[in-house]
Image (cartoon, rainbow, N blue to C red):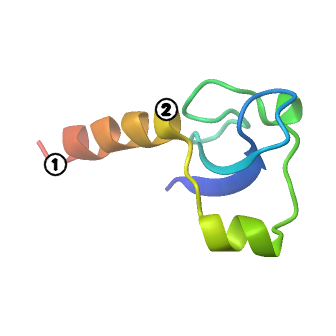
C-alpha cells in the first residue's frame, strides 16, 4: 500500500503538493527523502488546490500498470 503526504514540492520550496511515499521507506516515489521536503500541515489552500507531484504520480502510474500484468 502507498501513502500520500502533503509536503514541499522540492527541497526548500514553499509550495505544497501531495507526494506518494514508497513502501517501507520514508522516501517519495520522486526520490526525495521526507526529512528534506518538510511535511506540511494541510491548509485551506492546500486542500483546495490538491496539487500532486507530477514525478510521484508518473512513477505511481507505472507501478500500478505493472501490477495489472
**Residue name at image x 55 percent, y 51 percent:** 52
Res 61 → quadrant: top left
Work out whether 17 lies above or below 54.
Answer: below
**Residue name at image x 62 percent, y 56 percent:** 4
Q: Is residue 65 left or right of residue 16?
A: left
Task: Return the x and y of residue 56 as percentages of the image width and height.
Answer: 51, 38
Please give the label number shown on residue 15.
Answer: none
Task: Return the x and y of residue 20 as percentages of the image width and height.
Answer: 57, 46
Residue sticking out furthest to the left = 69
Q: Which residue is mark 2?
A: 55
Work out whether 44 lies above or below 14.
Answer: below
Q: Which residue is mark 1?
A: 68
Q: Is residue 58 left or right of residue 21?
A: left
Q: Is residue 63 left or right of residue 19?
A: left
Task: Return the x and y of residue 28 as percentages of the image width and height.
Answer: 63, 35
**Residue name at image x 69 percent, y 72 percent:** 47
Q: Earlier in the sequence, mark 2 or mark 1?
A: 2
**Residue name at image x 58 percent, y 55 percent:** 51
Q: Is residue 6 left or right of residue 52?
A: right
Which quadrant: the C terminus?
top left
Res 43 → quadrant: bottom right
**Whole-number angstrom distance, CA of label 2 to CA of label 1:** 21 Å
Label 1: which secondary element: loop
Res 57 → quadrant: top left
Few, some or many C-alpha atoms within 10 Å of disc 1 (few <14, some 14-19, many ≥20)?
Answer: few
Nearer to the camera, 35 or 10? 10
Few, some or many C-alpha atoms within 10 Å of disc 2 (few <14, some 14-19, many ≥20)?
Answer: some
Label 2: which secondary element: helix
Q: Nearer the viewer, mark 2 or mark 1?
A: 2
Work out whether 22 lies above or below 40.
Answer: above
Q: Is the Cβ of the residue at disc 2 closer than 8 Å to that at disc 1?
A: no
Task: Return the x and y of residue 42 as percentages of the image width and height.
Answer: 81, 68
Amino acid at each position: 500500500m502507498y501513502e500520500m503526504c502533503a509536503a514541499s514540492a522540492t527541497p526548500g520550496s514553499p509550495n505544497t503538493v501531495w507526494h506518494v511515499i514508497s513502501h517501507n521507506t520514508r522516501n517519495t516515489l520522486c526520490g526525495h527523502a521526507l526529512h528534506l521536503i518538510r511535511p506540511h500541515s494541510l491548509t485551506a489552500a492546500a486542500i483546495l488546490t490538491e496539487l500532486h507531484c507530477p514525478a510521484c504520480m508518473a512513477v505511481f502510474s507505472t507501478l500500478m500498470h505493472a501490477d495489472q500484468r
